[in-house]
Image (spheres, helix red, strand yellow):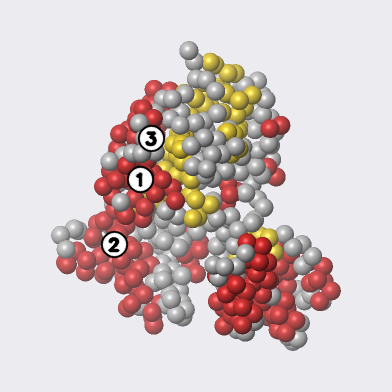
Amino acid sequence: MVRNIQIEKLFDVDKSWLGKFPVATDFDEVIDEDANVYLPDGTLALVFRKKKFQTLLAMTPDTDDYAYWKWASKALLSDQRGDAAGKEINTNVEIRLTEGQKKFFSAAIKKELTLEEARELLKDTTVSRATFYMKKTEEDGLVDLAEIEKWSKICRTKTTSPADREEALEKRNQAKLAWFENWLINTWEVSEDKIEAAKVAKKKYVTIQPRSNRVYSNVVGAIDRSGRTPYGRLTKTSTDKWEEFIQQQKFYEEADELLRETMPETHKILSERFDKISDKRYTLFGTCFTSITVNFNFQVAYHTDGQNAKNAAAVLSVLEKGTYEGSEFVFPQLRLAFNLRHGDFLAGDNQGLMHGMMPFKNTSEDFESIWFVMYQRDSILKLDTLECEACRKAFMSYSAEHFADELGSGEKNWSGSFTGMWGSPHWDSYKELRSKEGEYDYTKCHNTGIKGDPDLLPVRRGAKGMEKYG
């Protein structure tokens, strides 16, 4: 029997919750039975079914299927999970700016600051997601390389005690982070044009890509274009063990069918939308899903999945080894948590409802928890065929090799991207060249930018124009 839960009102949460880990006072009840959850307006928001995934229930730790998903979940130690990885940064602190340093650069490139004003901004020593190019600070003599190596050697030595290794690691990190103070005093403070000095340093040393805490979290299936990789593709994890990926087809199809049974209107919308996709390989073998995020022993903090398909649904489940408690999946706006365990099925609104996990507790020595999140990305609808997207990737390399003098950014490792490249005669000529060399007609590949719209930008040097789409 399925329990129907009618939510009378949604509880208030705001952006300050993002990145925080749930606590027991965030929910009133843990659901551990088949249930449907309805929002105040009567909309079906979530469905929960215990032990419903027959394919997953058959994946015990001694099976090849379990081994594949464990491998997939640990194939990437990701620093791109944003809020889900937690607000308080505690990994790779040796390559990060503080929030105070971010504030300093933001202010110092706009107006002349005194050293006292800079020091006031720098008092905020909270570790941020922003990182710096360590190699560039080393090349510019902003750190003591001998000091770094001294402590690194102690960290690498097998006979070093845990306490001594922890102390050496801390001192090594301090030596790496010393670059900013050295730059501040020896370059910025003595500069005749402090604004220009700050601009130069920010551009040279501070990375554009923010990095969250590192966690075992990976994507299987299709992934869309981005500013750094302006071509769609199946993820490396999918292609590295292609046969094993294909062998999971029954799992993908069961998830699709369970969503059809429990949320038929949502499934109909998604099926009709993704039936128009340019290449069926972007869906998981004809299902309404394009991608799966696979997590290993990863407690996710509060977040929303804002980049997934609109009016869609995510499907969640778990594989387990050993024993553990906790890990309840919490929706604070509903004041509900779900005891999602091996083979359970949870589906619903992953965009409008904030969600996160309680910590794992009382874990056995062989404890393993592999979480699946199956979802859709609308942006994948705008991709060309896999052949065309692979052609885009190849064009990047071709461009880097042949157009560096004409269109390059001047950087040693220029990626090959330049403004207006996908509407350029260079791209059209390359498609014709590829078509002559092979059997596939690459001339039918579209002249679309990162977001799938026609690339009408005038051709200019470097990759700066790509940020427009990013």
Q: In this rendering, which labeled residue sits more in front, label 3 or label 1?
A: 3
In the picture, measured across the screen, residue 414 lies left or right of residue 355, that is left
Instruction: State the CA–CA distance, disc 2 to disc 3.
Output: 40 Å
* Label 3 Cα neighbours within 10 Å, binned few <14 / some 14-19 / many ≥20: some
Front position among marks 2 and 1 = 1
Disc on the earlier residue, 2 or 3? 3
**Which residue is at the front of the view, 230 or 59?**
59
Extreme-right residue of the structure:
116
**Res 60 → quadrant:** top left
Out of 217 and 211, give the one closest to the viewer: 217
* Residues under numbered marks 2 and 1 in contact, where contact means CB atoms less than 8 Å apart: no
Kindly identify the residue that appears in the image at 28 percent across and 41 percent down: 247
Label 1 sits on a secondary structure element that is helix
Give the numbered dot on residue 412: none
Mark 3 secondary-structure assignment: loop
Decide: few, some or many residues near mark 2? Use Cα within 10 Å; few <14, some 14-19, many ≥20.
some
Q: Is residue 164 visible?
A: yes
Q: Where's residue 90, x and y in %?
A: 64, 56
Find disc 3 in the rendering and name its residue: 60
Query: Pointer 1: residues within 10 angstroms few (<14), some, or many (20+)?
Result: some
At label 1, the amino acid type is Tyr
The answer to which of 439 and 285 lies nearer the viewer is 285
Q: Is residue 101 left or right of residue 324?
A: right
Q: Earlier in the sequence, mark 3 or mark 1?
A: 3
Residue holding disc 1: 68
Dot 2 corresponds to which residue?
391
Q: CA distance from mark 3 to mark 1?
A: 12 Å
